[in-house]
Image: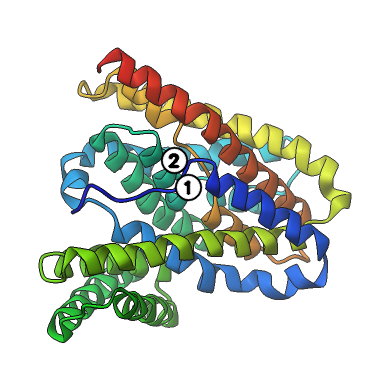
Amino acid sequence: MPTHRQTLPIWVLPGIALLGAAAGLLFAGPVGAVFAPAALHYIVPPLLFEAAWNLDLEAVRRAWRPVAILVLPGVAIAALCVAGALLLLAFPWPMAWTVGAALSATDPVAVIAFARSVGAPTRLVAIVEAESLFNDAFAVALVRASNLVLSLVAALLGALAGDLLGRFACWLRLRHALALWALSVLGVYAVGAAADAFGGSGIVAVVTLGMFMRTRIERTIDEGTLDGAEAYWRWAAVALNFVLFAWMGASFNLLDARTALLGAGLVVAALAAARLVTTMGLLRVLPELSEARRRFIATAGVRGALSLALVFTINVHLPGAQSARAIVFVAVLATMLVGVIALPRSARKLLASGT
């Protein structure tokens, strides 16, 4: 896996999110209601594929223990803490749990861009990258109460499709980055739709598609073509984040602003508490992770596209649905802004400590 991957400056994604949200607020109302349900099926899959495409599987294999802790108990603790905070605001339990599950997953696009841009050690980057991808799949399962067997079938479908598409690209001897990118886009939507059709998780299928397709082609397709396709995906991710935040902004009701600010404050505090329990508590059992490293991982708890898309799936007519959307919207923006400030500082302290 190439290690010279170009990255966006750390401020780009939060800036895009704020611009998108502002643009959406100008058209608040019907626009958001019409397009919001499409987010999970058309916006999130390519974002997750882009992150999976660039995942260093060998580094993840070496770091499987911290990744497992962050993904399994970490997601559950975050979901429960957020749900508990919302119960304090008199949200009904089903709504509180749905929002908690939606916010339990870190955002792969933001986390990868942030972690790489601050020059963090490769192993730590691999840990937070893998966490952000795998906990997305776990969060989707929590929100949608997905059948475990069907989720495993979806993962196998994505892996098989990724291997076959990779073989096909090698057989074609693709030398044009745009052609490779177009083939991968076709795979994203075809595999996601196929997995959703039989009740599995399109998100899980797309993640394994990205990992296995890249693994299959990286030793055959020349590096220039791979880098070109990667650049197309990188800028596609920026554009899709803008669209998603614009849709969310268009769904935002300014009348809910007071509730959103109060609720988001409690939710962000709950997310911070859950993150500290997982990173500074549970990860302490791993001697290879110093306190400075665990602090860096703690600051990588940025939320983003998937949280927004999952809360879009809540029936807007249910009690508390509008407030839930507003809270998630504000909380996601808040975690991005906190990440921009906290991650570079923790990275500098980590590098200075030499641990």
Q: Which sits in the foreground, 331 or 119?
A: 119
Residue 263 place in picture, x, y as percent: 73, 39
Q: Residue at x 43, y 83 (%)?
A: 197
- Colour scheme of the picture: rainbow
Task: Decide: is 69 above or below 290.
Answer: below
Q: Mark 1 points at which residue?
A: 110
Outermost residue toward the right in this view: 255
The image quadrant that residue 86 belongs to is top right
Residue 52 place in picture, x, y as percent: 32, 59
Task: Decide: is 257 above or below 269.
Answer: below
Task: Please indicate, yes or no, whether residue 89 appears anywhere in the rendered image.
Answer: no
The image quadrant that residue 248 belongs to is bottom right
**Is label 2 in a helix, a strand or a loop?**
helix
**Is label 1 in a helix, a strand or a loop?**
helix
Q: Do the residues labelled 1 and 2 touch (CB within 8 Å)?
A: yes
Where does the C terminus fall, quadrant-wise? top left
Q: Which sits in the foreground, 246 or 274?
A: 246
Answer few, some or many: residues within 10 Å of disc 2's Cα (few below 14, many 20 plus, some between 14 and 19).
many
The residue under label 2 is which amino acid type? Phe
Residue 51 place in picture, x, y as percent: 36, 57
Q: Which residue is drawn at 38% across and 75% down?
A: 188
Q: Residue at x 35, y 52 (%)?
A: 134
The residue under label 1 is which amino acid type? Ala
Answer few, some or many: residues within 10 Å of disc 1's Cα (few below 14, many 20 plus, some between 14 and 19).
many
Task: Decide: is 170 above or below 303.
Answer: below
Q: Mark 2 points at which residue?
A: 114
Outermost residue toward the left in this view: 219
**Lateral position of residue 249 relative to residue 205, left or right:** right
